[in-house]
């Protein structure tokens, strides 16, 4: 057997062990798939809530639906990136906002 083939046979288990160390277990994949489905439901409910909201123009505070949608997308992308990484990349250090209250103060000057 040529030396090249022996090296290949020796490297195969190392490559398999290395690649599987980043793959989620079947149980974890199932759980994260469930998280993704729940994110879909949350996004759908938020869209319905936004459509049904009766915010008046003079309301000081409103719920920030676009920001919530952006955070849901970030979570979805993070889960998907973990489940099927394209290659090792630096993580995005941007954190979720988590504050969904819009302060819509009046534009008129204070006395």
Image: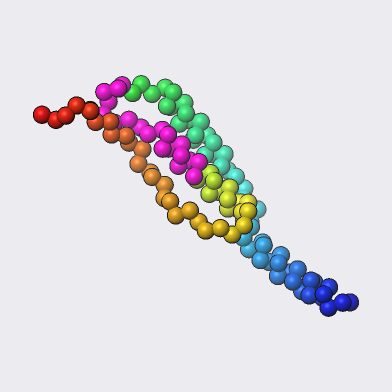
**Residue 89 or residue 9, whichever sits in front:** 89
Residue 19 coordinates in the image, percent (x, y): 67, 62
Residue 102 coordinates in the image, percent (x, y): 32, 34
Residue 69 coordinates in the image, percent (x, y): 46, 36
Q: What stretch is highlighted in magenta?
A: 56-74
Residue 31 coordinates in the image, percent (x, y): 58, 48
**Whether residue 62 is visible:** yes
Q: Which residue lies most toward the right here?
A: 1
Q: Horizontal placement of 43 versus 97: left or right?
A: right
Q: In percent of the image, x 49 and y 45: which residue is there? A: 74
Q: In percent of the image, x 43 and y 27: which residue is there? A: 49
Is residue 47 placed above or below 17 in the rendered structure?
above
Is 67 colored magenta in this rendering?
yes
Q: Which residue lies most toward the left here?
A: 111
**Whether residue 27 is visible:** no
Is residue 37 placed above or below 60 in the rendered structure?
below
């Amino acid at each position: 057997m040529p030396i090249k083939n022996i090296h290949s046979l020796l490297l195969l288990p190392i490559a398999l062990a290395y690649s599987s160390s980043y793959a989620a277990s079947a149980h974890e994949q199932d759980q994260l798939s469930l998280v993704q489905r729940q994110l879909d439901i949350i996004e759908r409910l938020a869209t319905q809530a936004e459509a049904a909201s009766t915010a008046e123009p003079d309301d000081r505070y409103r719920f920030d639906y676009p920001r919530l949608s952006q955070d849901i997308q970030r979570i979805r992308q993070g889960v998907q990136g973990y489940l099927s990484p394209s290659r090792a990349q630096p993580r995005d250090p941007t954190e979720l906002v988590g504050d969904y209250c819009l302060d819509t103060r009046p534009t008129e000057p204070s006395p």
